[in-house]
Amino acid sequence: MDLFEYQGKQYFARFGIAVSPGGVADTVADAVAVAEDVGLPVVVKAQVKVGGRGKAGGVKLASNIDEVRQHAESILGLDIKGHVVRRLWIEHASDIAREYYASFTLDRANKVHLGMLSAQGGVEIEVVAEENPDAIAFLQIDPVVGLDVATARRWVAEADLDDVAREQAAELLVKLYVCYTEGDCDLAEINPLILTPDGRVHALDAKVTLDENASFRHPEWEEYRATETEDPREKMAKERGLNYIGLDGTVGIIANGAGLAMSTLDVVNQVGGSAANFLDIGGGANADVMASALEVINTDPKVSSILVNIFGGITRVDEVAQGVLEALERVDITSPIVLRLDGTNAVAGREILQPHLSESLITESTMLDAARRAVALASAASA
Amino acid sequence: MSIFVDEYTKVIVQGLTGGQGRFHGLRNRDYGTKVVAGVTPGKGGSDVDGIPVYDGVAEAVAATGATASFVVVPPRFAPTAILEAATGGITFIVCITEGIPAQDEALTYNRLVEEHPGVRLLGPNCPGIISPGKCNIGITSGDIALAGGPVGIVSRSGTLTYQALHELSQQGVGQTTCVGIGGDPVPGTNFIDCLSAFQDDPETLAVMMIGEIGGSEEERAAEWIKQHMTKPVVAYVAGVTAPPGRKMGHAGAIVSGSKGTARAKMDALADAGVHVCANPTEAGQKMVEIVKAL
């Protein structure tokens, strides 16, 4: 789960990482109130989960209240790469002497944590990595050992941060590492991490991605979930514990397992169709989960056929078949359903469906045939 | 021959008294796997359909001589269960648990490597391992596999592992061993571990490899194949149509920027001389062709 900048900063603050004083605002009046509270000058920042908001006019400096009003008005409702700004973060403007970069993430290839630190912050780190890779100091961290301040001190020296910033930066990096590990982040990134002319080091931005598998030990994440996605179908799917991603096509997809779901998208594409979504009902899905999946897809007006591709392992195909029948009873499924069922208890599953098969409930014996059928039905519906 | 397990492998099930543990543990036994004990703290002395249950792994190992464990416990308990298996004398651990936090996985993996260097972990979040006719540890439906070889299968995706088995078995092509390594960010066993074991296994004559978007394991495998693999490899990579920046179910399955795309992985594999196919069916057909020509 990606956090907005303001949520990331609030998360950082929990771990004692220095951030600028600020507050959120959903209206121009709120923006003015926050600005008066934190003290002028302020920076008015669009809260969107997409890069490049500065270039799009989503970040502006205001030195008086009139400018706060002007900027808040122009930024609220602004469309930044398809993301409409509904919330602002107003923070006290910092004087900047130097901009650094710091992040922690998982080094999947080496199965350890990876810290990245650079004295060249404020620009995209990918660009630095490309143009001047020596400007980034990489630090591999064994999760068993962790990061201590002595190592962090050597690291800031290696990255060639300014002398005056080093001790504060080292301490901040240790806190950021704790935020990343104990806070269960997939990514904790500060860009820029700044040094002010009066010698203070603090986070001017926050990019945090939380690992949702760790939700069970973070009840405080509940508030982030409310603002997570604007897509009503993705919200509905999430509430029902389904992995759903909306796409642009006409064939609704339900599969068990991420790999099979991805492969189903690929195959639909190869036989000339396009998927309306990715939906993985996960391992061990029961009848209720299957029924929920069909309900979610049924609310998508673009869908003109539904392809259910199940290969039972931990998921039992008879349960899936039962779920399809339950869904048909519970809601009026408007598109024809093509099913391909194999694996654990597949014979029993097919037997359950047998008496109910019709022009709008079809089984095919292979993944390719099922994809072809679903795509043909979708094109027939749109013709 | 098979890799990692064989017909003599004795297996304990950590979590045998739970719903999933019971269902799959008994299914594994029905398949012919030597499931010799269950472990559930606090339930020692009871049994599940005749399989004795012990309070701890060390006790179960001492009583049965088991060397493998099937870990089927909820995510918050799985890291402890894995480390208990290693401490208790198990050398091959299969963990099917889905949803373990990445931080816990990274920590557990490194503790295993540092404190128990002789132990192999398969998974987490994987379907397990099946050597048809000999041993099945995990959640794979045994009836879709066919004994006798000569194909080894290694897959990052659970359900696509079944699909791969099914495509081959239906054409009468058997498997030596099928290993599901799982799609999580820190897998205990990776492609190269399996490719290397298949390369060394005299009964495995060809290998089918199923990858997916995210990370760079397929690219690393391609590099390894180029340098070391003499047996033919057929590959399929799922997620050609996956949009960037969106996690496709697995924590690991994400295209970040230009990295981790299916296309890049397919290109790297093709460059290493691997037969890269567009979908699982095509991969199955290609493998049948290769086996027939052997």
Image (spheres, coloured by chain):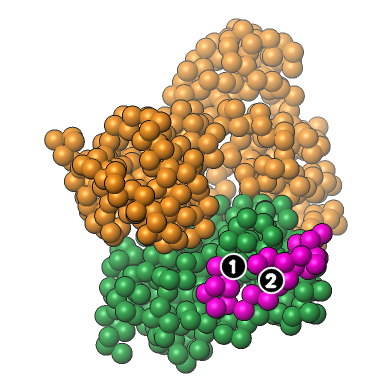
* Quarter of the rendering containing residue B274: bottom left
Against A250, is A309 above or below? below
Q: Colour of chain B?
A: green
Tell me the kind of residue under disc 1. Answer: Leu
* Quarter of the rendering containing residue A72: top right
User: How crowded is the residue under tag 2: few (<14 C-alpha within 10 Å), some, or many (20+)?
Assistant: some
- Determine the residue positioned at 42% across, 45% down: A322
Quarter of the figure with the N terminus of chain A: top right
Residue A121 on the magenta span: no
Tell me the kind of residue under disc 2. Answer: Ile
| Secondary structure type for disc 1 | helix
Q: Colour of chain A?
A: orange
Residue placed under numbered mark 1 in the picture: B26
Residue A285 coordinates in the image, percent (x, y):
50, 48
Q: In the image shown, does B80 or B117 lie closer to the viewer?
A: B80
Q: In the image shown, does A238 or A272 lie closer to the viewer?
A: A238
Q: Are marks 1 and 2 on the same chain?
A: yes
Q: Which region is colored magenta?
A: B26-55
Residue B31 on the magenta span: yes
Residue A144 coordinates in the image, percent (x, y):
78, 62
CB-based contact (under 8 Å), mark 1 and mark 2: yes
- Determine the residue positioned at 81% across, 32% down: A198
Q: Which mark is residue B51?
A: 2
Quarter of the figure with the C terminus of chain A: top left
Q: Chain of mark 2?
A: B
